[in-house]
Amino acid sequence: MDILGKGIVTLRDIATRTGFSMNTVSLALRDSPRITPETRDKIRSAAAELRYVPNHVAKSLVSRETRTIGLVLTDILNPTLTHTAQAVEKALAEKGYGTLFATSNNTLEEEIRVVDMFRSRQVDGILIYPTRHRELAHLRPLRKANFPLVLLIADPDAGIDGVSVDDRSGGFRATRYLIGRGHRRIGFLDASHRNGNDEKLEGYQQALAEAGMAFDPDLVVPTTGHYARHGYFALDEMMNRPGPPTAIFTDNDSLALGALRWCHKHGVRVPDDLAIMGYDNIAFTEFGEPPLSTINYDVDAVSRLAVDRLMDLIGAGDVLPAPRVTLIDPELIIREST
């Protein structure tokens, strides 16, 4: 009989192949000292030939652990979040955990659905970049029920553990740098307004206020999305308003790329006529023409610290410690676009 053809190899199959009892096979595969090395090697050799893999579902019924973590992000096409998925998966694998991945596609309803789906699959914890940073009512009950959960944003008032780059500080640093370069008309392309995520805008406004500069709503253009094309058309709108800016700060680097394309097409010199500051420091920024100044979103640090905190919560057992929020101060990366 072709055992491999059945798809799933069981302890019974190994026992049939080797002539040992199922109990002996089980002990050998768990490296029990009750089994002689000769017997263990014979059983392990048969298991390898049959391509046996342990039944983690059965194990989880006993251990109450599945060794899997749910990861929820908003948009897999966002380069920073793509990098985050890779970094989280790697960090979890190093700790012996698998990753179940889902995207909310920037909708709260889908986010709620995938969180419930992960819970039904008995994941040991969840890492989530929420669609709306201030709408967490569906997540707070999980934390109150001692379910391990870490946000990939940092809201001190959420009552949930979080790890993130300090976006308010990033917006402040970007704007303050442009002010320091002598700019007095500084625009902001805002992609986060749709979901009420205003940290970068607040940092932008704070820098203006500290410099004694009035906030001009005409210098903020809400974009219709997060991609380069949205940056292109948002800058077109801004530059055709009265009193256009001499510098802009963008919500992410993709918007900055679109803005850079608009400048090339319309004969606007960067940075001589318009300085451009992005956000995230994704891979292409240093290869732009010109290379883009940006704020570094340290994906690896955020992912590592978030996974470490989640492991702490999982290890805490039935009563979790008080929520802790970790903010990483972002680095300003200066290149030729400013």
Image (cartoon, rainbow, N blue to C red):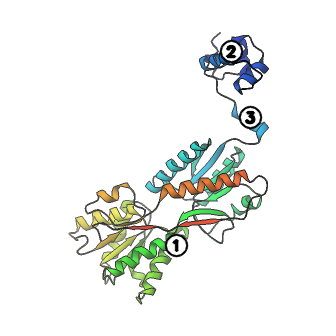
Q: Which residue is mark 3?
A: 59
Q: Secondary structure at mark 3?
A: helix
Residue 335 in percent (x, y) is at 30, 66
Is 22 displayed left or right of 118 in the figure?
right
Residue placed most toward the observer, 220 or 81: 81
Residue 83 in percent (x, y) is at 47, 52
Residue 199: mark in rendering:
1
- Choose top left, top right, bottom left or bottom right for residue 251: bottom left
| Residue type indicated by callout 1 | Glu
Is 194 displayed left or right of 112 in the figure?
left
| Residue type indicated by callout 3 | Lys
| Residue type indicated by callout 2 | Glu
Is 117 displayed left or right of 72 in the figure?
right
Mark before the other along the chain sequence, 1 or 2:
2
Q: Quarter of the image containing the N terminus?
A: top right
Q: Is residue 110 visible?
A: no
Residue 38: mark in rendering:
2
User: CA gap, disc 3 to disc 2?
Assistant: 26 Å
Image: 202 above or below 164: below
Q: Secondary structure at mark 2?
A: helix
Residue 303: mark in rendering:
none
User: CA gap, disc 1 to disc 2?
Assistant: 63 Å
Residue 126 in percent (x, y) is at 65, 52
Which marked residue is nearer to the observer: mark 1 or mark 2? Answer: 2
